[in-house]
Image (tube, grey):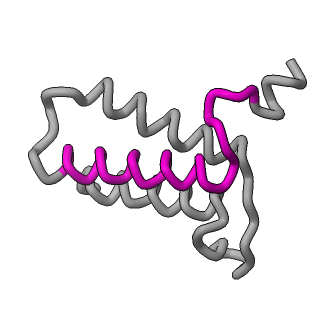
Amino acid sequence: MNVPFLNVLQVFQVEGLVALGKMLHPATGEIAKNEDYARYVIGVLDTLRQKTAGNLEAEEERFMEQTLSLLKLNFVEVFGNPDAPSTMDQLA
């Protein structure tokens, strides 16, 4: 099965929005914010952007940038400064 790259990005977009409390969790139907998971999803998308640079179609690149912007802006709105240590960093 060949999964279109836009579908992969959409999965991460939904995961990020759920972690930010902007969408209901599909399994529970509840809002459940998770700062560490939101950071993780944004990090994965940033890594994908770096690793796929120059290899994406225009629509894929545009959607990637829009998704990252959406998630990062909402992260700041929900959790504040993304450069502040996460709870996972504080445990280390």
Quarter of the picture holding the C terminus: top right
- Nearer to the camera, 66 or 15: 66
Where does the image place residue 37, in percent across and percent down from the top left? 67, 45
Q: Is residue 72 left or right of residue 57?
A: right
Q: Residue furthest right?
A: 91
Q: Is residue 2 visible?
A: no
Q: Main secondary structure of the magenta part?
A: helix
Where does the image place residue 18, in percent across and percent down from the top left? 61, 64
Q: Is residue 6 left or right of residue 32?
A: left
Q: Which residues are magenta?
A: 60-85
Instruction: Answer whether residue 82 is magenta in the image.
Output: yes
Where does the image place residue 14, in percent across and percent down from the top left? 49, 63
Q: Is residue 65 above or below residue 81?
A: below
Q: Which residue is drawn at the image coordinates 75% and 26% (left, top)?
A: 85
Where does the image place residue 89, in percent across and percent down from the top left? 79, 24
Q: Is residue 85 above or below residue 11?
A: above
Q: Residue furthest bottom?
A: 29
Q: Is residue 44 above or below residue 60?
A: above
Quarter assignment of residue 1: bottom left
Q: Which residue is drawn at the image coordinates 20% and 49% (left, top)?
A: 62
Q: Which residue is drawn at the image coordinates 49% and 45% (left, top)?
A: 72
Q: Is residue 38 visible?
A: yes
- Nearer to the camera, 85 or 10: 85
Instruction: Answer whether residue 57 is magenta in the image.
Output: no
